[in-house]
Image: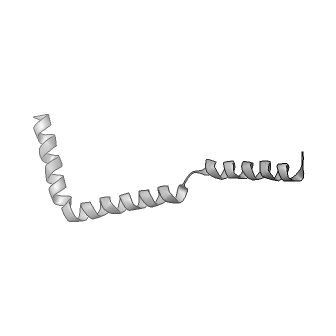
């Protein structure tokens, strides 16, 4: 095996190791943005959402 082949195999192994980690920063951004949307909705429409939930639960229970 030549030095060049060994380097290619090593580079391929490193590339596969990087692919296995996943996209952690992307998932963190999605979680933070979702939490921000939920917080904003609760501030803007919290009372209306609570009234809708209460009415829905009251209609089911009887």
Q: Residue at x 62, y 47 (%)?
A: 20
**45 lies left or right of 30:** left
Residue 7 position, x and y percent, is 82, 53
Rendering quarter of residue 24: bottom right
Residue 23 position, x and y percent, is 54, 54
Q: Nearer the viewer, residue 12 or 48?
A: 12
Q: Residue at x 73, y 49 (%)?
A: 12
**45 lies left or right of 16:** left
- Could you tell me which quadrant the N terminus lies in? top right
Q: How many marks?
A: 0
Q: Nearer the viewer, residue 37 or 6?
A: 6
Image height check: is 40 above or below 4?
A: below
Residue 62 position, x and y percent, is 9, 34
Q: Nearer the viewer, residue 18 or 57?
A: 18
Residue 46 position, x and y percent, is 20, 59
Q: Nearer the viewer, residue 33 or 6?
A: 6
Q: Residue at x 24, y 65 (%)?
A: 43
């Amino acid at each position: 095996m030549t030095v060049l082949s060994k380097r290619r195999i090593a580079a391929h192994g490193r590339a596969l190791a990087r692919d296995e980690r996943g996209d952690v920063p992307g998932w963190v951004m999605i979680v933070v943005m979702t939490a921000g949307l939920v917080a904003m909705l609760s501030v803007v429409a919290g009372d209306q959402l609570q009234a809708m939930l209460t009415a829905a639960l009251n209609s089911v229970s009887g």
